[in-house]
Image: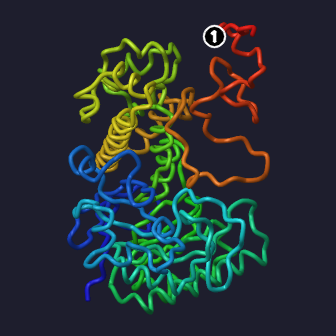
Amino acid sequence: MEKPGIFEIIRPEDPSVLGPRLGQLTVQGRSKLETPNFLAISSRGVVPHMTPDVIAASSQIGGVHMALEDFIEKSPSGTPPIMKIPGNPLHTFTAIPNSIITLLAPRRTPAVTAPNGNSDTAISVFTSTGFQALSNKSYISSIQTLRPDISIALADLTYGPLPGTKRTVKMSDRTQEWLSDLLSENGHGGAVFAPILPIDSLSQSEYLDYLADDQAGEISGLAFYDSNLLPDIPATTSLSRLPHLSLDEPASPHHILRQISLGMDIFTIPFIGHATDAGIALTFRFPRPLPDDAVASNDTGSSVVPLGIDMWIPTHATSLLPLSNSCTCYTCTSHHRAYIQHLLSAKEMLGWVLLQIHNHHILSEFFSSIRASIKMGTFEADAEEFGRIYESELPEKSGKGPRVRGYHFKSEGPGEAKKNKAPWGNLGSDDQSAGRGLVPDENSTELQEKGFAEKVEE
């Protein structure tokens, strides 16, 4: 049977050459994904702020990264609802358009740090009802039931301080064993990406040799948790021809360009959602701003152009300009900055929906321009020009985002301040201290002092 997830390298002719490359990922029944490109990141099975119909009508998203920990939890029946869906559960349950590629990983990106370590047979995952153990056997069973187009094998990862020598050896051994189990039981025939651990190549040399010598014909791609390890992958023809997926969480488009220069093909980019939540509209273009955007993008007077605009700035309250003059997304062709700022200020969800549509469009155009640059052979010069023109980091958040969900933010200790400000408090007072009610005591002079009433003498 033909292996799914076939990746074709279009440029360069020699796949073992380290550098930017053009490719095409083909999954049966889905639209082809031209690379370099990115996968949208989901939360609880949806792309934040975007419904499936909006994705189909107003985005160029070619694939979605999903996490099994988003769908499993402790329940009386013992079987998560998604596991009971017939046919193709992952697409049906999430209502993702059929043309879009689904990639299933054990954990989200970025993942919440687990308080408990992994064992020889399981890792710790963060579900909607708290942390629980996910065994490799259970993960393999879930893959066979959910039938994702691509699945990433279980990896023994640590979050936080770098592990010691003994721990890294254990990480490599466990990951190799878990991958071997998945490949031997891959009954549904979906594509499998082998994880590359975020430790030095020497510590996982045996695992890398195992991939190159024994499993190169069985795996369909490599998933990197540290893009710096790309140059250390054995330059065998079989491994070089595999697609490279980055789970490295790039912090800016500059980091994306660096990874592409090393040969990365597919990305997950958390900063898209972070920018949307912060009320920031991304405006960067590759390799330079378009003429219509040149003045508007650099209205701060700085010698470098910002990567985005903060929609909480008061000057946008009366601006009838689109988020980006040259942008052709639904948001920019239908609405102006003043309207979007009004929505954000009023806490209307539509404000973040429109920003998310725009920000995903900007990234899609960014990657499209990168592919054109690689095709023309000017990528290196264009990336250098982009680095000179644009600021190194995204604008800082200045306003309030949507209400923080506890599912995404794990408490780290006692006495921690609440993530969300209380929606109401004492009438006419900024005092939010505990124990104070909205109604004064019977003998209190509080109402009289505030001018709301006058105490009547009997």
Q: Nearer the viewer, residue 55 or 170?
A: 55
Above or below: residue 132 compared with residue 228 = below
Q: Is residue 451 visible?
A: yes
> Which residue corresponds to the image point at 54% horizontal and 73% vertical from the top-left?
74
Quadrant in the picture for residue 185: bottom left
Report the residue at 53% width, 75% height from top. Answer: 234
Three-letter code for the amino acid on which mark 1 is drawn? Phe
What residue is shown with label 1?
Answer: 452
Task: Assess disc 1: are there few (<14), some (14-19) or many (≥20) residues with their C-alpha within 10 Å of its C-alpha.
Answer: few
Q: Which one is nearer the viewer's eye here, 343 or 27?
A: 343
Q: Position of residue 124 (x, y in %)?
A: 63, 72
Residue 145, image x, y percentages: 37, 81
- Residue 48 in percent (x, y) is at 41, 49
The chosen color scheme is rainbow
Residue visible at 57% across and 82% down in the picture: 135
Comparing 160 with 203, the one in front is 160
**Could you tell me which quadrant the C terminus lies in?**
top right
In the rendered structure, the answer to whether residue 180 lies left or right of residue 292 reads right
In the rendered image of this protein, does residue 355 appear above or below residue 27?
above
* Residue 286 in view of the camera: no
Residue most extreme to the bottom: 184
